[in-house]
Amino acid sequence: MSGPFDTVSDEAIREGTATDAYFQRTERTLEHADENPRVVAEVTVDQFATGEFDVLAGVKDVAHLFEGRDVDVDAIPEGRLFDGGPVMRIEGPYLEFARFETSLLGFLSQASAFTTRALEARRAAPDSQVLSFGARHVHPAITPLVERAGLVAGMDGISHVAAGDVLGREAGGTMPHALMLIFGKGEQEAAWTAFDEAVGEDVPRVALCDTFTDEVDETLRAAAALGDDLDSVRIDTTGSRRGDFRHIVREVRWELDAVGREDVGIFVSGGITPDAMRNLRDVVDGFGVGSYVTNADPMDFALDIVSIDGEAISKRGKLSGVKEVYRTAAGGHHVGLADAEAPADAKALFEPLVRDGEVVREFDLDAAAARLREDVEAVDR
């Protein structure tokens, strides 16, 4: 029975009906023919290294997808960088996991794309505060995916309340233009003051300063209205009105300093990209990044059988045989056959994820973020 929202249930995912129809027909065909070999299947984007690293995410969801199934799964941990070759392998009777391929690929494809984009944004302004503002661009059911991507990538905070509840993180935020509009033109001070009086002491006083008049004008009025309580101003000027946005921000900074308010920070948002961040990072204190992350194209992961009953096999265009992936001492990504000798001083990246249907790995968000920082440093040598 369908609910009020177009959302597939947890039960449908766990039972395997959240799948493409041809997997159900494949199951019926193999059962009819009494065929169910033991296979090894690998999940890949590219067969060979391309020189472009991406971040693997979505591993936690895949682990729980196979909980209770008669399979073994190995995977690169969440937050590791990869460049070609498999990121995950599954071993077991084919009919134990055939119907779950669609969900598996979906879990990895979007989460990895979001996290890779979030990392690009984080690295564009390494010394600035960067917040995840992307929840409004996706279906509410997957907002934790967006916010987790930002946190794994090293962003400093999230905006979505329910996603924060799922992730065990408190959401943050200040005021929308709707608040300013409701108080009305000429009543900006009343809006800022009411906000200051209404919210808890732990909430930063960040005044939105671009609603009715010039950004400099509203900024100076907010500084006067809130006095020492004002922590920052947020500039979210519509793109069609920005002109030279860097120049606008520099004007705001100049005039704040001129009235002795060097303590007031400047935060910008609205269609922010890594290029914009690099252009502004020396004149602003923080960024809200949303659409750049959520506009990411899903990664084109595929699941392919590479061994049947111990014999290497593959479709045309794919590489047969069970493989291993390594981080080399120089920070490179190496792909080789699992039974071949590993490169000297290289670290194998696959770790057990599921054994006989039991999830054998813990999923700590902070650990994943630390892992990504470590990997970025290794790869950037």
Image: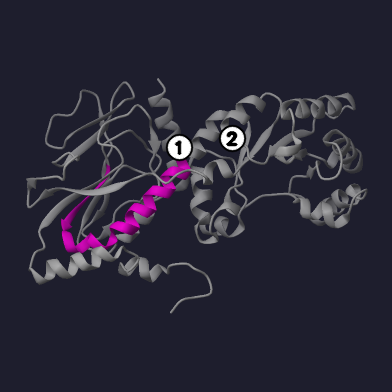
Residue 88, horizontal then vertical, whole percent: 27, 46
Residue situated furthest front in the rendering: 240
Sort mark 1 into few (<14), some (14-19) or many (20+) by Cα contacts within 10 Å. some
Q: Which residue is mark 1?
A: 370
Looking at the rendering, in which quadrant would you find the C terminus?
top left
32 sits to left or right of 163? left
Sort mark 2 into few (<14), some (14-19) or many (20+) by Cα contacts within 10 Å. many
Residue 171 visible here:
yes
- Amino acid type, mark 2: Thr
Q: Which mark is residue 273?
A: 2
Residue 82, horizontal then vertical, whole percent: 34, 35
| Distance of label 2 from label 1 (alpha carbons) | 24 Å
Q: Secondary structure at mark 1?
A: helix
197 sits to left or right of 6? right
In this picture, which residue range is highlighted in magenta?
87-116
- Amino acid type, mark 1: Ala
328 sits to left or right of 248? left
**Tally of marks:** 2
Q: Main secondary structure of the magenta part?
A: helix
Say which of marks 2 and 1 sits in front. Answer: 2
